[in-house]
Structure formats: C-alpha cells, structure tokens
Amino acid sequence: MFPFIDLAKINARFDLERAFGAFVQRAQYIQGEESASFEHEFAAYCGSRHCIGVSSGSSALYLILKAYKQLGKLRDEDAIIVPTNTYIASVFAITQNNLTPIFAEPSARDFLLDVSRLESLLTPRVRAIMPVHLYGQLCDMQAINAFAKAHNLLVIEDSAQAHGAYVRDPHTRAGAYGDAGAFSFYPAKNLGALGDGGAITTDDDELALTIRCLANAGSVSKYTHTLDGINARLDSLQALVLRAKLPLLDSDNAHRRAIAELYARSISHSEIILPHFRTSSPHSHVWHLFVIRTKARERLRSYLARNGVQSIIHYPTPVHKQQVYARYNHLELPIAQILQSEILSLPISQVQSFAHTQKIAEILNAFVG
Ligand SMILES: *Cc1c(COP(=O)(O)O)cnc(C)c1O
C-alpha cells in the first residue's frame, strides 16, 4: 500500500524505450559517445574537472584508493578514518586495498561523522579520511577539509547517497569538496540507473587518468596494458539512462525535501525523534532517506507493516560488528551501536505523493507504544 520506493514509477517519467531503439541501432555498447557525454555533464553538474563513469559505487570507492596507491600517495597498511555507520562498501574499498580502517563514531544528532572526535583517531599511519554523506546530508566539509589540511590527509567523499547536495553554491556539490568523490547509481539512489553504475569525480588530472586506466583493464589504448587494472566501466546503456535523468535531479531532490518537510510538520509522537534539519542550508540535504529514531523500533516496525507501510533499517549492523570483520568485532563504538538499534527509514522518493506522506504520518501518530 505504501511501498518504500516505486522504481517503475520513477523511471516511467522518461521516454526510455524510444531512446533504446536508437541505442541498439548505434551499436556502441561500451564507452563511446553516451559515456563521454554523461561524464562531461555529471562533472559540470557536480563542479568537478573530471568524472569517470564506472560499474558501481563500490568500484568507484575501490578505484579511488587503488589509484592513490598506484600513484604512491597511499601505501600498504596506511590507515583511513571512516564512519562505522555506513554501507559496507565504504570499508571494503579500504580493506580490499590492503589499507586499515579506523572506525569513527557518528554524531547522534545528524548521524554524520563526528568532527570533534577526529583528533582522537589520529595515528601516524592515518593518511586519509572518508566522510560519508549519509542519508543524503553533507558532512561538515569545511571542518573536515580544515582537519585534513592540518594533518596532510586525503579526503575521499562517499557521495553515494548525496547526488546534488550543496551548501551555498550550486557550482560546488557533493563529490567536489574533497580530493575525490565516489557515486553510486544503484536504481534506488537519488540518481539511479536501470542496473548498477557509479562514478568518480575529482579535480586531480593525474588521479583521473590513473582511475580511467585502472577501470579499463589497465589500458588507455586497446591491448596495451600499462597498469594492473580491472574491468569496471560504466555501461553505455546506463550512461544513456543517466543522461536522460540528470536534468530532473534538482527538481527530484526538491520534491524529496518537500516530502521530508511534510513528514516533519506532520509527525508528532512522544516516542519518535525526527531527523535533524539544517535550516540555514536546506540544499545540504537531498533526503536520500528519511530516518527517524525510536526506542520502540521493533514494535513500530511491525505496526507499520501491519498498516501497509514498508520501512527499512539502514543499516542493521555497524560495519565493525559485521561477520566479515571478525578482527574488529571487539571494538565498541557505543553511539553507532545505540543508533543502529533505534533507526528506521520511512518511505520517501521523488514520486511519493503528499497525500501518501500525510497518511503515513497519521499512521505513525496513531502508534501506541
Ligand atoms: C550505495 C552505496 C555504496 C555502494 O554503491 P553500489 O553502487 O551499490 O556498489 C557505497 N556507499 C554508500 C554510502 C552507499 O549508499
């Protein structure tokens, strides 16, 4: 009745079938014009010099770190500060490059990397920091960049949930604040493909060239392999879809913001804590997710399900407590662990109606904890 997100409805707004006919005829399925044009347009949109389309957000993160190692800016066992309350791909990129994650606590107020704790995480091996613009809200990039500059650290923005977010100037957006940004175009992201896709943004010419080569089997000209690369290119078909959808991203994000504001005005319950709004910079949050907190999370979740409202937990386990990271399971990050037991994501999307949103708020308000 109230689905979390309706992907078919999101994509039905574009006349994609017609474009597909011409695409099949053109037969330029890998790279080519669509990919190059999308990269151009997305770089301009974010305010970066370069954009490299890749196969997913995970490979975007992985390739940034792999390229920094290739360039000698990161070495085996170097450490990277990363929040533990993120999608696991942020941390996979670190460990799969033989680098060490230093897990950071979020702030309970906005779920984002707590900048006041960064100093205490520094070790001589820390060479980079990976802020994650979680749920669509920009981290405090001014403070993070200042910290990074003072300690000579690279800044890699995990922008997979924050396409288009900016503070004051729309010419500089998520992915253009740090040294490099990683994006995912997973279908449910604010800018989503019809399958997997991702991108990297950067102003660094050398980094861009290295990533492009690494993502293309270590090759810039066919069958000449200069680097130990992988195949992680963005499909031309996905580039075509993303080009069609990019012009609507700002209005889609504006609609998400209006939905979030309506939730905030309409939900009133003593057991529910609403997400933080930075009223002074409304565009710094693109509301990929609308995440409430409640100590009655499990009961609320089944109550919502009984009333036809789909909700999801992003994410049910902090990364340092995941099985794959048994070697970090002993760590205690109490703020992240408490948040993880209280968070719940409500339905939100660029095609969700105000009437539905209002109804979901009424259902929430009628919850008897
Ligand atoms: C979606 C996501 C990723 C990974 O993107 P994929 O395209 O699914 O590989 C990485 N980090 C965060 C924060 C994400 O939300």
Image (cartoon, grey):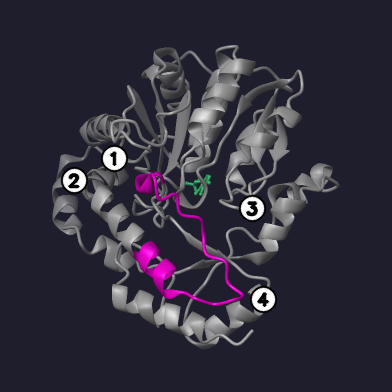
Estimate how packed mark 4 is, as few (under 14), some (14 to 19) or many (20 or more) residues with alpha carbons within 10 Å: some
Tag 4 or tag 2, which sits nearer the N-term? 2
Q: Quadrant of residue 30?
A: top left
Amino acid type, label 4: Ala
Place of residue 107 in the rendered image (x, y in percent of width and height, measured from the top left) = 63, 47
Q: Please identify, in this view, whether the residue under mark 4 or under mark 3 is nearer the observer.
A: 3
Q: Residue type at mark 1?
A: Ser
Residue 179 relative to residue 322: left or right: left
Mark 1 and mark 2 residues within 8 Å of each other at the beta carbon: yes
Mark 3 belongs to which amino acid?
Ala
Answer with left or right where residue 159 lies relative to residue 167: right
- Of the image marks 1 and 4, the number of the one nearer the N terminus: 1
The segment highlighted magenta reads: 259-284
Residues marked 3 and 2 touching at CB (< 8 Å): no
Determine which of the numbered discs, if any, sits on residue 108 in the image.
3
The numbered mark, 3 or 2, whose residue comes first in the sequence reads: 2
Q: Are marks 1 and 4 in contact (CB under 8 Å)?
A: no
- Mark number, residue 296: 4
The earlier-in-sequence mark between 1 and 2 is 2
Q: CA distance from mark 1 to mark 4?
A: 46 Å
Q: Tell me, yes or no, if residue 223 can be seen here.
A: no
Q: Nearer the viewer, residue 103 or 209?
A: 103
Q: Amino acid at mark 2?
A: Phe
Alpha carbon distance from label 1 to label 2:
9 Å
Q: Which residue is mark 1?
A: 236
Q: Position of residue 237 (x, y in %)?
A: 28, 45
Q: Is residue 265 magenta?
A: yes
